[in-house]
Structure formats: C-alpha cells, structure tokens
Amino acid sequence: MKRISELSEGEVLALAIANEEEDARIYLNFAAKLRPQFPGSAKVFEEMAEEESHHRHLLLALYERKFGKELPYITRGDVRGFLKRNPVWLADGLRIDAARKQAEVMEYEAAQFYGQAAEQARDTDVRKLLADLAEIEKKHESLAAKLGETNLTPDVRAEEDATKNRLFVLQIVQPGLAGLIDGSISTLAPIFAAAFATRISWDAFLVGLAASIGAGISMGLTEALSDDGEITGRGRPWIRGVACGVMTAIGGLGHTLPYLIKDFWTATAVASVIVAIELAAIAYIRWKYMETRFTSALVQVVLGGLLVLATGIFIGSS
C-alpha cells in the first residue's frame, strides 16, 4: 500500500474522483433511509450528494486536461492511512445522530485528504482545485454537525467541543474499545482452561498475566502500525497504540487478578463476576460511542464471551 505522499498527481486526482463518487452514494443512502421520518435532514444529504457529484465532475475535467482519458483504478483501500467506512447506512432503522456523526467523519477525512494533497501538488491548477475542495469539505463538516438541530446559528465553543469529541472517539475510544474487547474475551479461554486444568489459582494467574500482557503488546503494535493517521485525522499512531494495548491488558487482567486468591473456587467466582462486569461495560461503550443498540451490543458481547468462556472451561476440564 502507498502513502499519500508517494502518489503521483494523476493518482491523487483519480483517488479523489473515486472518493467523491463513493461519498455521494453514501449520502444518497442516508437520504433514502431518513426521508420518511426526517425529510429536512434527508434534503440536506441529497444536496451534499449533488455537490459531491459536482466535485467529481470538476476533478474529472481537470484530470482529462492534464493526463488524458485513461483513469487509473485506485481506491481508498489502496492507500495507507484511510479510515475504513463504518457501513451504518446499511443498518435498519438508521438513527439521525448516527448518520450525522458518520457524515462528520467523512467530511473531516475528506478535508484532511484534500489539504495534504494540495500541499504536495506542484501543478498550480491541481493545487488550486484541491485547496478549494479542502475548504468546501470543511464547510460540509460544519453543515453535517448541524443536521437535526433546531438552532442553526454557529457556536464556536460548541463546534470546538464537537471536534474534540470526534477526535477523542477516533483516537482513544475506537482503539481502546477494540483492545478491551480483545483483552476481555480472547483471554477467557486460556485463563479458565489453565484454572480448571490445574485447579491451582497461582498457575491460572501466571497464564492470565502472560496472556494479558502479551495480547496488550500485540494489539498495541497492530493498532499503531495499521494507520499513520495522516488522512484519517486519528492522531499519532503511538497514542492509539498505547490506548489499544493498555485496554487490552486491562481487559485480561480484570479476570486474572482474582486468581491471586488462594482458594480456587472463590477466585473463580470472583473472576466470573468481573467477566460479567467487563462484558456489560463493553456493551455500554458500544452503545454510547459506536451507535450500537444496547440490547444488540449486550447480546453480541455476552454470547461471544460465554462461548469463549465455555471453550476454556471445557478444554481445561477434559
């Protein structure tokens, strides 16, 4: 995968064209989903889709003038640093706040992309168009943030708080939640397998300690190396890596520490209670920040956790 700085100007324009086309289709999906209950917001999404299509035509015209009609095939998935879209538009009963937050992320990412692409462009026509599009996308971000609000008067402090909250979700909550899920669920099997295999609390504690710290290191490195944050605005890789790694370790250590209790059954009972608390916390965070229905999130997390837990107990008892 290439970095944005390694793309030629032709590839940058081709990538921009693909992005505008995809974003326009996403906005039209938002409009179709929201139109029955939120016709006003649906109209805004339709207008945003029309403008994205207009941007695509501008980019296509410029590309043809500069590079001809052979358009290279390149998508966001071919460039390191692009944030994968969360397909909320496919969900039944799309919530207006979920659509608005997704639109904010999309426009913020687009503005970041055009801004950086403009800085590295050497052709004056390309540089001017990309810079203009960066400014337009920033206005779209503000527009998306106001969807569904009754008072459209801009409030600087509110916008700053919204931006901070969005960055907090991108840089801390998302990687932290991924780590907490992995640490809380994936370590259940080895810890409880060791516990029921030996019936010795200290042995289970050592296995849990190794699994938790090892998983934390692995998840932290994976998160830090997966996205440099240049385009997505997700911040410095090491910050996200630390958040993911620490939460992974915490998730595993939560049900590991009870095995410091010498009595095996007492330690296992305490660990089981902590597992239930961890799973409920994961479901709550997914509901609050990831726009997942709490009951749906709870069922998914609890079902997965119970299956992993049962696997560990079954293997350890055999």
Image (spheres, grey):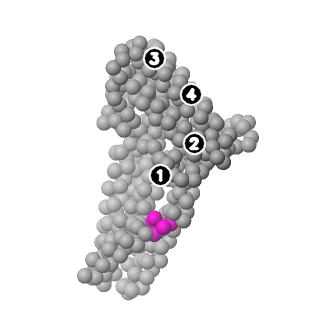
| Sequence-first tag of 1 and 2 | 2
| Sequence-first tag of 4 and 3 | 4
Cα separation, mark 4 vs mark 1, equals: 30 Å
Residue bearing the label numbered 3: 61
The one of 29 and 64 positioned closer to us in this rendering: 29
Cα separation, mark 3 vs mark 1, equals: 38 Å
Residue displayed at 35% across by 55% down: 219
- Which region is colored magenta? 298-302
Cα separation, mark 1 vs mark 2, equals: 28 Å
Residue 34 image offset from top left, x and y in percent: 61, 45
| Sequence-first tag of 3 and 2 | 2
Front label number (3 vs 2): 2
305 above or below 109?
Answer: below
Residue displayed at 33% across by 20% down: 70
Q: Secondary structure at mark 4?
A: helix
Residue bearing the label numbered 4: 51
Residue bearing the label numbered 2: 32
Residue bearing the label numbered 1: 174
Cα separation, mark 3 vs mark 2, equals: 29 Å
